[in-house]
Image (cartoon, rainbow, N blue to C red):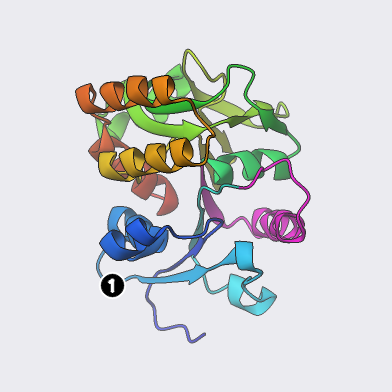
Amino acid sequence: MGNDGKKRFAVLLCAEDSDYVKKKYGGYFGVFVEMLAEEGEIWDVYRVASGDFPDDGDIAAYDGFVITGSCSDAHGDDLWIRDLLILLNKLNSFNKKVLGICFGHQILGRALGGKTGRAKSGWDVGVTNVELSPSSSKLFASLKIPDLLSIIECHQDEVWELPPKVEVMAWSNKTGIEMFKYGDHIMGIQGHPEYTKDILLHLIDRLLHRNLIMESYADEVKANVKSHEPHREAWKKLCISFLKGRL
């Protein structure tokens, strides 16, 4: 990779694209590029769930990495998950900026020595209010965003605990670790700042179709989604500012 002075970022894609997201957004990579990319940047994708990883030589060329959600368990031991843990430890040792979303948040927590697993309170799907810690509010003060931020959630796993060197930045009524930060270079967010409401409604139908959630729960969640708005712009600002070192 040549060094042409442009900022480079890579999305580590941990999910298979649904036909719907592929058709409407150009896949989940397209969804993340839509939220995070700015003019003059180069964005690449590595389909890590299919075994496609950046070479050691390529890692240095990137300014930051984003880890996506996944249908897989972050506490699982699939070969690609073990390889991803090795890569994340390398990125940490190189002090690379890494932003993890949902599964990405959980696998980062695991890579840093925390524990992940099934959420004791079951599925969390819908628009959830997340409370920023006082130190978070201070860190993001220049962004002028609320201390209580709503975000789209769609997960049945969570980060149970983190080592003391990792700081919990936000929590909700349902989840004790909604966001964390390690140093100035690693951040995990349990919710989906990149999702639109239509992506979530489509996912609810898929979960229902695969008998992963009950119809009564799906109806309840759809009503919640229709009556609540996620703070998408605030999360976009937060994610961009972190990933690009503007905090």
Residue 27 placement, left or right of 172: left
Q: Label 1 amino acid?
A: Gly
Residue 47 placement, left or right of 194: right
Q: Nearer the viewer, residue 120 or 54?
A: 120
Q: Secondary structure at mark 1?
A: loop
Q: Residue, x 35% and y 49% (percent of image)?
A: 240
Q: Quadrant of residue 237?
A: top left
In reply to whether residue 30 is colored magenta, the answer given is: no
Q: Is residue 247 visible?
A: no
The span picked out in magenta is 72-101
Q: Nearer the viewer, residue 152 or 18?
A: 18
Q: Nearer the viewer, residue 12 or 15?
A: 15
The 10 Å Cα crowd at callout 1, few under 14, some 14 to 19, many 20 or more, is few
Tell me: residue 173, above or below residue 214. above
Q: Residue, x 39% and y 37% (percent of image)?
A: 204
Position in image of residue 39 (x %, y %): 24, 68
* Residue named by callout 1: 40
Position in image of residue 201 (x %, y %): 32, 38
Residue 134 placement, left or right of 31: right
User: Which quarter of the rendered picture does the C terminus lie within?
Assistant: top left
Q: Nearer the viewer, residue 39 or 23?
A: 23
In reply to whether residue 94 is colored magenta, the answer given is: yes
Tell me: residue 113, above or below residue 244. above
Q: Is residue 73 visible?
A: yes
Q: Residue furthest bottom?
A: 2
Position in image of residue 89 (x %, y %): 72, 54
Question: What number of labels is visible?
Answer: 1
Q: Residue furthest top?
A: 173
Position in image of residue 95 (x %, y %): 62, 55
